[in-house]
Image (cartoon, rainbow, N blue to C red):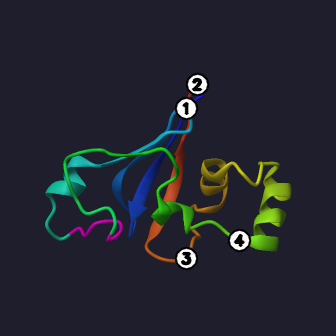
């Protein structure tokens, strides 16, 4: 089952992050965000570009938004998500109340 999330920077839709069935990841900037010169990239490692970013693992920028150690264990138990389900934890814990300019909103599907 693939999963996807809208990525916001300062409440502006910056792009879409997707995890496919094989835990491969894709990030693509939103067209309006890309074309707006006032909107910076979401991270230094993912400069604004028209091309998709592809990875065999969750991009380090998004991975670093996750809790570590005891906090990750608590979140895993609380949300009943495996500690190794990085994308699931990102969806569950990085909503509007996250620290910093970036937040994540799950795209619900009817699958």
Residue 101 rendering spot, x and y as whole percentages: 43, 73
Quick one: SS at disc 3?
loop
Q: Residue at x 72, y 51 (%)?
A: 84
For label 3, count other residues whose C-alpha is less than 10 Å away and answer few (under 14), some (14-19) or many (20+).
few
Question: In the image shown, does 55 or 18 lie closer to the viewer?
Answer: 55
Q: Within the image, what quadrant is residue 111 found in?
A: top right
Q: In this view, which residue lies farthest toward the top?
A: 111
Q: Are marks 1 and 2 in contact (CB under 8 Å)?
A: no
Which one is earlier in the sequence, the residue at label 1 or at label 3?
1
Alpha-carbon span between mark 4 and mark 1 = 25 Å
Question: In the image shown, does 46 or 32 lie closer to the viewer?
Answer: 46
Residue, disc 4: 68
Q: Are marks 4 and 1 in contact (CB under 8 Å)?
A: no
Residue, disc 1: 2
What residue range appears in magenta? 39-44
Q: Is residue 109 above or below residue 56?
A: above
Question: In the image shown, does 17 or 32 lie closer to the viewer?
Answer: 17
Tell which tag, 3 or 2, sits nearer the viewer: 3
Residue 102 rendering spot, x and y as whole percentages: 45, 67
Residue, disc 2: 110
Quick one: SS at disc 2?
loop
For label 1, count other residues whose C-alpha is less than 10 Å away and answer few (under 14), some (14-19) or many (20+).
few
Tell which tag, 1 or 2, sits nearer the viewer: 1
Which one is earlier in the sequence, the residue at label 3 or at label 2?
3
Q: In this view, which residue lies farthest toward the bottom?
A: 100
Alpha-carbon span between mark 3 and mark 2 = 30 Å
Tell which tag, 4 or 1, sits nearer the viewer: 4
Tell which tag, 4 or 3, sits nearer the viewer: 4
Residue 59 rendering spot, x and y as whole percentages: 47, 56
Residue, disc 3: 99
Which one is earlier in the sequence, the residue at label 4 or at label 2?
4
């Amino acid at each position: 089952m693939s999963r996807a999330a809208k990525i916001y920077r300062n409440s502006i839709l910056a792009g879409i992050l997707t995890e496919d069935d094989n835990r491969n990841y894709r990030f693509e900037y939103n067209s309006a965000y890309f074309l707006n010169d006032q909107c910076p990239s979401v991270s230094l490692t993912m400069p604004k570009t028209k091309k998709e970013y592809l990875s065999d693992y969750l991009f380090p920028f998004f991975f670093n938004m996750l809790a570590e150690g005891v906090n990750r264990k608590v979140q895993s138990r609380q949300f009943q998500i495996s500690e190794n389900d990085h994308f699931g934890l990102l969806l569950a814990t990085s909503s509007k109340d996250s620290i910093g300019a970036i937040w994540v909103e799950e795209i619900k599907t009817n699958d």
